[in-house]
Image (spheres, rainbow, N blue to C red):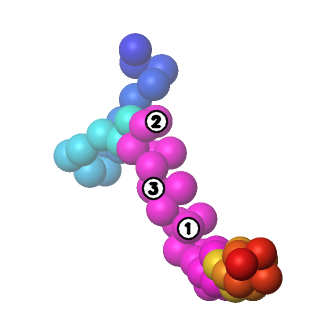
């Protein structure tokens, strides 16, 4: 259990691995947000075009 908790002696709080992983995920999403939005819009356009042609 103690190896899963990092104690910061200069501060009065601890950071668990789970919290650190969440923070890393949020940072990655913020960093790649523009690419994710672009990909999402591209996929929507592709499916809209495909659906329109199939009617």
Q: Nearer the viewer, residue 6 or 25?
A: 25
Q: Residue sitting at 45 percent across and 25 percent down?
A: 4
* Residue at the spot of label 1: 29
- Of marks 3 and 2, which one's residue comes earlier in the chain? 2
Q: Cα distance, mark 3 to mark 2?
A: 10 Å
Residue 17 shows which numbered tag?
2
Q: Residue sitting at 40 percent across and 18 percent down?
A: 2
x, y percent for residue 36? 64, 75
For this orientation, the residue located farthest to the left is: 12
x, y percent for residue 45? 70, 85
Please determine whether, in this image, residue 4 is positioned above or below residue 41: above
Please determine whether, in this image, residue 4 is positioned above or below residue 17: above
**Image quarter hosting the C terminus:** bottom right
> Would you call the spot at circle 2 few (<14 residues within 10 Å), some (14-19), or many (20 or more)?
few
Q: Cα distance, mark 2 to mark 1?
A: 18 Å
Report the span colored magenta.
17-43
Q: Is residue 24 left or right of residue 10?
A: right
* Residue at the spot of label 3: 23
């Amino acid at each position: 259990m103690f190896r899963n908790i990092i104690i910061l002696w200069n501060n009065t709080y601890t950071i668990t691995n789970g919290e650190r992983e969440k923070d890393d995920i949020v940072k990655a999403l913020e960093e790649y947000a523009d690419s994710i939005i672009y990909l999402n819009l591209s996929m929507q356009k592709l499916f809209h075009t495909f659906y329109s042609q199939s009617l």
